[in-house]
Image (tube, rainbow, N blue to C red):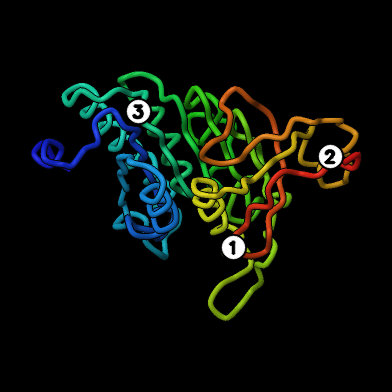
Amino acid sequence: MDSKSLETAPWVKNAPIKILSHGYTGHKDFSPNTEIRPAYMQCCNYNIISIDYNPIAREPCYVSAATNTELVGKCTAQLIDELIQNHNFSISQFHLIGFSLGGQVVGYVANYIKSGRFDRITALDPAMPLFVTHDKKKKIDSDDANFVDVLHTNSLEKGKLESCGKVDFYANGGLTQPGCRTTKNESSSSCSHARAPQYYAESIVTDVGFYATKCYSWISYMIGWCELYDSNEDILFGEYVTTNVSGLYFFRTNSESPYARGPNKRKSE
């Protein structure tokens, strides 16, 4: 984008601006854009910007791609500052959504923005390799926006297990996803990783909803202790999440689309 294209773009004034960031080897017409963009176009009259940094995120060098996320974040922050300072947009209009490496890009955008603090950042199975660090400036974290929501679908392989948002959602435990198997064209890990933008896109348009239950920790969930938590606090995962919640939440999905299963049933019901 340049100044002229910013002026002539068909902006929906005062509407939310969704900024989508792809992952390793991706581009503007790759995940999460192919899932989330059509969902927004179906439901809402929003502005959508798709970041494309494919030339510096190509195979076979993941190390360079991971390193370049900081540069992409810095450049994206400059674009947003330009829109706010010279084109009469408000920082409250922006919602950043990143998948995989893009989930780390949006954290860097928050580090470099000069026009204020974002209301919301969403990270979809943010990349783990080369982002295991105590330095919060080098990874997505809960301080990057007023509300940071994170989805985990392939933890300990392509995505992170550690909680890094104000609220973290673990789909089906966050490790692997039902229905994902290694085939000739795709590994089980890649399939589980790719479910993150699919679940989020479905959350935008579903009438059923992904309902998640709070638990102490991931370990508590895995060993079946969450029922001892006595939580009746189910919340919606995804686009319409309540932004005044915090902690770790867990939900189950179907093994194929549509994935949402609706409200959870309690044993007492």
Q: Nearer the viewer, mark 2 or mark 1?
A: 1
Along the line of sight, which residue is nearer the eye, 253 or 160? 253
**Sequence-wise first label, 3 or 1:** 3
Q: Which of marks 2 and 3 is in front?
A: 3
Residue at the spot of label 2: 220
Which structural element holds mark 2?
helix
Mark yes or no: residue 64 visible: no
Identity of the residue furthest to the bottom in this view:
184
Q: Seen in the image, is 69 located left or right of residue 210?
A: left
Residue at the spot of label 3: 93
Which structural element holds mark 3?
helix
Residue 141, above or below 42: above
Q: Seen in the image, is 63 located left or right of residue 10?
A: right
Looking at the rendered structure, the number of numbered marks drawn on it comes to: 3
**Sequence-wise first label, 2 or 1:** 2
| Residue that appears at 30% across and 51% down | 52
| Residue that appears at 54% across and 43% down | 131
Locate residue 94, reporting x and y percent.
36, 31
The reply to whether dot 2 and dot 3 touch (C-beta < 8 Å) is no
Q: Quadrant of residue 168?
A: top right
Q: Nearer the viewer, mark 3 or mark 1?
A: 1
Which structural element holds mark 1?
loop
Locate residue 12, reporting x and y percent.
25, 36
Locate residue 41, reporting x and y percent.
36, 49
Residue at the spot of label 1: 257
